[in-house]
Image: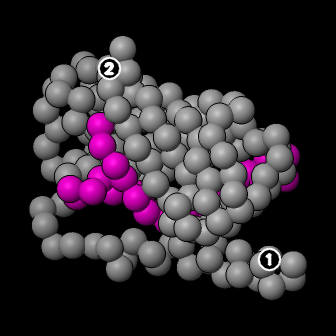
Amino acid sequence: MNQIIKGLCLMILLLPSWHVFAEHTQTPKHTVGTLRCKVLPHSGMNLLIHSSKDIRCKFTSKYKRLVEYYKGETGIKFGIDIGLGKHENIVYSVLSRGLEQGEYQLAGKYSGASGNATLGLSAGHSAPIEKDDKSISLQPINIKNSGVGAAAGLSYLYLEFDH
């Protein structure tokens, strides 16, 4: 158990440098809006090295001209995720080189690294996660967890249009 805790702490410490390895030399992305996601309680599964949870999200463009709703799944595809009674809300800053209005362009698969520990309140760090086609990045700016647990590893997010 002591080795698991040491490994989890090491993963959390290395997360801030993870995105450096994923950088590419294209035109910089600009903030185009905010994506607010709520993890649905009692959804998904937790298998220690893999976890998944259902989410509902609301995208608001930078100047509040556009609002889009998404549903999907988030989780750890490889890492550690141990928790009890966790409730999560995540706010992302949406970065893109050019986002078209009303096209539901946030839909798709994203991946990156994350880590947090929760004992009543949360603490942790998540590097930006990027859409598979590299067109959009999501930078976590506010993660609120409650409950007891710890998670670190390669994370994913899948979004699709929600009515």
Predominant secondary structure in magenta?
Answer: strand
Q: Can you say whether 36 is above or below 92 in the image?
A: above
Secondary structure at numbered mark 2: strand
Q: Residue at point 22% right, 48% down? A: 96
Image disc number at residue 84: none
Q: Residue at point 35% right, 79% down? A: 21
Q: Can you say whether 69 is above or below 153 in the image?
A: above
Query: Relative to 21, is 117 on the left or the right?
Result: right
Q: Which residue is mark 2?
A: 67
Give amino acid for label 1. Ile
Q: Position of residue 20 (x, y in %)?
A: 36, 77
Q: Position of residue 133 (x, y in %)?
A: 20, 56
Q: Nearer the viewer, mark 1 or mark 2?
A: 1
Q: Position of residue 105 (x, y in %)?
A: 22, 36
Q: Which residue is mark 1?
A: 5
Q: Position of residue 118 (x, y in %)?
A: 78, 54
Specify start and end residues of the magenta stretch as a single range. Answer: 107-134
Does 153 lie within the magenta span? Answer: no
Give amino acid for label 2. Val
Q: Residues within 10 Å of mark 1 (few under 14, many from 20)?
A: few
